[in-house]
Amino acid sequence: MSFQETPVPSDEEEAFYVHCRAAYLAVFRSSLTNISSKQQLCRALQQAGRNPTHATLNKYWTPRTSKLNFDEFFEILKSEKKTEETELMRAFKKMDVNSDGYISHSELEKALTTRGEKMTTEEVNAIFSMADINKDGKLDYAEFCRLLVSTVEQCQMAALERLEANAKLKRQNFGSQSYSPPKSSVSSAAATLPQPPETPRAESDTTLKKDSRSSSRASSARSRRSSLSNSITMTSSTNKASKIPEPSGLQDWHHSYMKGCFFLEDDGSISSLQYQLHLPQTTTVYLTIQPLSLSHGLDLPSSWMTVDTALFITSAGETKEDSTLVCFTETKEKEKYVWKGELDAGTYYLLPFTSGCRLKKRSKKSLSIKPIELVYRTDTGELDLTRELREVLSDIFEVIDLDGNGLLSLEEYNFFELRTSGEKCDKDSWAVCKENFDMRNNQLTRQGFMELNLMEASEKDGDPADLWVTLEAMGYNRMLELVEACPFQLDVHCEGTQPAIQPLSLDSGPKLLIQALQKSITAKTGAKALRGQDNVFIYTYRGEHRISSQIANKANQKVTVHVNNEQSRNCCSSRGMSVFAVEVPARTKLVCQHILPINERQEWTYNCVESMLPGT
């Protein structure tokens, strides 16, 4: 099988990329630094030759935005074209009531303070004083347009010259984009030293946040000058995968199953229910986990069916801290991840996991699209739920019906309530629900779940705001697409005894899972020290379908490690970037990244270089 090659960019694409990099470096010291405010975004766009309006900035920096990385800035620049002189002229001509090529102060003030993004009188005066070149009380808008466009171009060229003058920064790779300096690059004879890096932020050992890929702000250009690196190259192919055959007579084994869902949080981390498994006696176990399809019986598979899943099984000690890793699913059979073996009688924790390589935050493009209607008024004037919303609510019911009996117990309903509102429904409130909504055996039916949501919409007189809060918390966007969640199902078959599974909590904290994940990596591979370092070690777990790396810092001070995946082929990283830096606190180990193939049918090569950044 041949490698999946990265397409070679055209001259035009490469030139655009150079300008994008130049603009970013004109504002920040490193590609690893995030844009952390709307003002910084405005400055970076201006350095790229854009003249962003308030509306443009608000489009990309919403109330929920806390940071943007270089890749996201790159995509914004692709969408936001430079203001052309002809467009500016067209706008000014509309203000020129006399068609004489001039605009008076009063005409300009009326236009800019009453239309579109209204300016203050002070802002208008500032523009007029700058543009009234002849000081005759009139604005020669043709000259003003030329001046503005020329200033924008000068700003862009100055940013490019700063980049070209610095040979080290010119070779720096940004984000997940790969770049080779063009042959026509300006001589680096006048190169200046890069600015000192900003203080990196610590990355917690107890989180698996995707956004931590940008936690270090140190310059990768400096790291290449003084790094001590360790290179590990691996190749793998799905053709080499071993198989665990389904046991014969499986239909006669004792079986128990439970549903759940991976949810993407606002900070990029992934949360999930955790479960407890009880085995009355020692038995052979066949255990699987897989994404759960919600396709309404259609032929098209659900979009999240390619999301990788895994299940870690730990023993349940007297406290959760006492638990030890017993086993985890490594082999894949179609969408299922499988483990088969013998488990002693006792109680275990089942910890669902996904790497985050295929379940990531998406851009909020759908916010600019008109949302799908959720409620409508019937011919009699009564409110009702639209067909589209009913289908989604039916899917949500399917996901939160953990035991699959077609009914929601109070416990199951409260997992939904905690997820969407943060509050629990008590037994008294549940009794009120029983009086108003369809229930069976003190459990809410699918019809009752619809009635409950209709009542909430009716109480708001059809305002869908609360419904959207619920839907977004469950992973849906404004087009009612499930994009930030992955439902799953885990099955436990036992040959000699009846297993019992029950959910533990929606998110009891990732500590248990991270401990199990770390143990799974260190148990399967040896440590390899960074060259020249006695206290910093890299563990690289190579599974059949996933590669995971872990950094162990045994020193008494923190270290910052630069990670470069650019030579990998047909790979995607849970970090979302091919170049990043990670700060590892003293006496700490943390999971660095997970790697999955982009195309499972082709060979994939993992080639990672970890380097110690200077000053750590």
Image: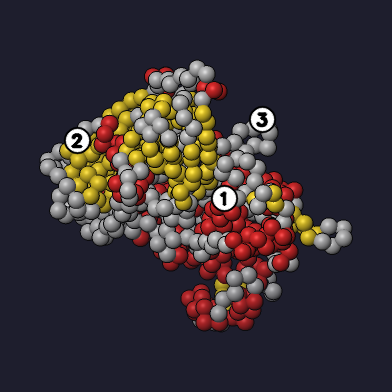
Q: Nearer the viewer, mark 1 or mark 3?
A: 1
Relative image position of residue 133 (x, y in whole percent): 49, 76
Front residue (pair 576, 433): 433
Quadrant that contains the N terminus = top left
Q: Which residue position is annotated with label 1?
A: 412
- Earlier in the chain: of badge 1 and badge 3, it is 3
Residue sitting at x 36%, y 32%: 344
Report if residue 15 is visible in the image: no
- In the rendered image, the residue lying farthest to the right is 380
SS label for mark 2: strand
In the drawing, does residue 291 fall left or right of residue 514?
right
Q: Which mark is residue 528?
A: 2
Residue sitting at x 43%, y 55%: 267
Relative image position of residue 168 (x, y in whole percent): 25, 47
Q: Is residue 434 above or below residue 122?
A: above
Front residue (pair 6, 309): 309
Relative image position of residue 68 (x, y in whole percent): 43, 56
Residue sitting at x 42%, y 20%: 243
Q: What is the crowding at mark 1: few (fewer than 14 residues within 10 Å), some, or many (at least 20)?
A: some
Q: Is residue 303 above or below residue 477?
A: above
Q: Nearer the viewer, mark 1 or mark 2?
A: 1
Q: Which residue position is annotated with label 3?
A: 299
SS label for mark 1: helix
